[in-house]
């Protein structure tokens, strides 16, 4: 079972997500929080595999909570966003969010995104992608990254491409016939060479540079 922590200041949203992420689909809702501070407390006690995090909340918002979870080496965060959250997407990306999905997405997409992020992959909702890419470009001017991209080996490009397609480490290893340890080494090299912090930024880079 995938342990899920739901974080949103609207009870109806949390209730709806709870009905989508059902036990029969492999999910266990271990906690619900209405703000970032409560989410941090519950994350420590319930040890979730993934956190579904709203960005805009009273008190500590989702960006600050995501940043603190990353600092604590906590669970990956799938950000729940709306069409009017552009100004905070950059903050969520910089804070280390592992994925972005619209609250209005279909139940199937929410299930797939949660599975992917909990499994160590990243997720970029196509409807959100242009805005996340804009946030990425603002934070990573093109001048330096173009030359750094040439430092990637062919195998590292293959790993980056599969990461951008939502594959986790195990799936990448199986597809390329290498070990998971080797995949982790390639990912570390990719992050270092491209000056990236996490998989979400790597996905944004891959789409921005035409790798996928």
Image (spheres, rainbow, N blue to C red):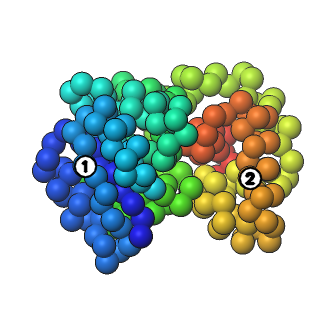
Nearest the camera: 190 or 63? Answer: 63
Residue at point 60%, 61% (across, down)? 167
The picture quadrant where one finds residue 148 is top right
Quadrant for the N terminus in the image: bottom left
Nearest the camera: 43 or 208? Answer: 43
Of pointers 1 and 2, the one earlier in the residue sequence: 1
* 71 up-or-down from 122: above or below: above
Element marked by disc 1: strand
Element marked by disc 2: helix
Residue 140 position within the rendered picture, expressed as x and y whole percent measured from the top left = 62, 25
Q: Is residue 34 left or right of residue 155?
A: left
* Number of the label disc, if any, that sits on residue 16: none
The reply to whether residue 111 is in sight is yes
Q: Which residue is mark 1?
A: 32
The reply to whether residue 85 is in sight is no
Q: Which residue is mark 2?
A: 184
Residue at point 35%, 74% (across, down)? 25
């Amino acid at each position: 079972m995938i342990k899920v922590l739901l974080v949103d200041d609207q009870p109806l949203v949390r209730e709806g997500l709870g009905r989508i992420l059902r036990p029969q689909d492999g999910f266990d809702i271990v906690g619900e929080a209405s703000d970032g501070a409560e989410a941090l407390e519950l994350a420590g006690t319930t040890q979730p595999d993934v956190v579904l995090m709203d960005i805009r909340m009273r008190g500590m918002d989702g960006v600050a909570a995501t940043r603190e979870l990353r600092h604590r080496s906590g669970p990956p965060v799938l950000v729940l966003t709306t069409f009017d959250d552009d100004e905070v997407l950059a903050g969520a990306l910089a804070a280390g969010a592992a994925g972005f999905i619209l609250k209005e997405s279909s139940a199937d997409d929410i299930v797939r995104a949660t599975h992917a992020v909990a499994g160590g992959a990243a997720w970029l909702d196509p409807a959100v992608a242009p805005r996340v890419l804009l946030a990425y470009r603002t934070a990573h001017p093109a001048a330096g990254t173009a030359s750094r991209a040439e430092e990637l080996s062919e195998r590292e490009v293959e790993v980056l491409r599969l990461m951008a397609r939502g594959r986790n480490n195990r799936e990448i290893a199986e597809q390329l016939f290498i070990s998971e340890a080797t995949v982790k080494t390639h990912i570390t090299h990719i992050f270092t060479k491209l000056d990236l912090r996490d998989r979400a930024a790597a996905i944004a880079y891959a789409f921005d540079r035409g790798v996928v």
